[in-house]
Image (cartoon, rainbow, N blue to C red):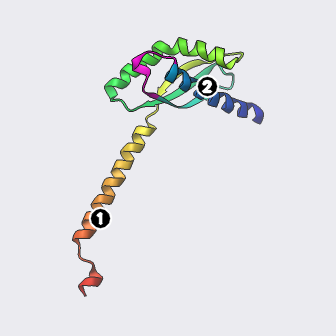
């Protein structure tokens, strides 16, 4: 049982690498050029794969990216089948990964809090120096 789980992870990692290469080098659709494949989850029977991706585009442009990925789904699956030689090539399901966007937003909030804290402490006199 554990070997099967390990194999599933290895297959998911290989799918991620292959899809990243295909998106970077083979797809000509400009809607799909600026994405990053962040993770892949494969079902135990390899029939389905959730492909998580992110992009630095606006929300409006993300709709175009999603349509581009849906349009390229068959092309990607076919080329994936040729590259990986699996008995079953999984159906690809693309899911936008908002974790990078959330991380950037949290980082900005932390930077703002630190700047505000420094400004507040800079204005308040130090009680030890006052006495």
Query: What secondary structure is found at the residue carrying circle 2?
Result: helix
Q: Residue furthest front?
A: 25
**Residue at x-position 72% and y-position 34%:** 6
Q: Earlier in the sequence, mark 2 or mark 1?
A: 2
Cα distance in 3D space between marks 2 and 1: 46 Å
Quickly name the residue at label 1: 118
In percent of width and height, residue 2 lies at 76, 36
Q: Would you say 70 lies left or right of 50 here?
A: left
State whether the magenta stretch is mostly helix, strand or loop: loop
Q: Is residue 74 above or below residue 102?
A: above
Q: Residue furthest bottom?
A: 131
Q: Residues within 10 Å of mark 1 (few under 14, many from 20)?
A: few
Query: What secondary structure is found at the residue carrying circle 1?
Result: helix
In percent of width and height, residue 89 lies at 65, 16
Q: Kindly indicate whether the residue at mark 1 contacts the one at mark 2 (C-beta within 8 angstroms).
A: no
Q: Is residue 53 magenta?
A: no
Q: Residue furthest left?
A: 123
**Residue at x-position 58% and y-position 28%:** 16
Quickly name the residue at label 2: 15
On residue 88, which mark appears? none
Q: Would you say 101 lies left or right of 78 here?
A: left
Q: Is residue 1 visible?
A: no
Q: Residues within 10 Å of mark 2 (few under 14, many from 20)?
A: many
**Residue at x-position 43% and y-position 21%:** 32
Q: Quadrant of the C terminus?
A: bottom left
In percent of width and height, residue 128 lies at 29, 83
Q: Is residue 126 visible?
A: yes
The magenta segment is 26-35
| Residue 117 in which image quadrant | bottom left
Q: Is residue 124 above or below residue 71?
A: below
Q: Is residue 40 above or below residue 22?
A: below
* Numbered label tally: 2
């Amino acid at each position: 049982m554990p070997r099967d789980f390990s194999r599933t992870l290895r297959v998911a990692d290989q799918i991620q690498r292959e899809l990243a290469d295909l998106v970077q080098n083979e797809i000509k659709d400009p809607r799909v050029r600026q994405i990053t494949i962040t993770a892949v989850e494969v079902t135990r029977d390899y029939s389905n794969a959730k492909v998580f991706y992110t992009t630095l585009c606006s929300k409006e442009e993300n709709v175009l990216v999603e349509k581009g990925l849906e349009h390229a789904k068959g092309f990607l699956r076919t080329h994936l089948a040729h590259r990986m030689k699996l008995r079953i090539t999984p159906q690809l399901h693309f899911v936008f990964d908002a974790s990078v966007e959330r991380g950037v937003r949290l980082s900005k909030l932390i930077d703002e809090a630190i700047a505000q804290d420094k400004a507040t402490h800079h204005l308040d006199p130090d009680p030890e120096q006052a006495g």
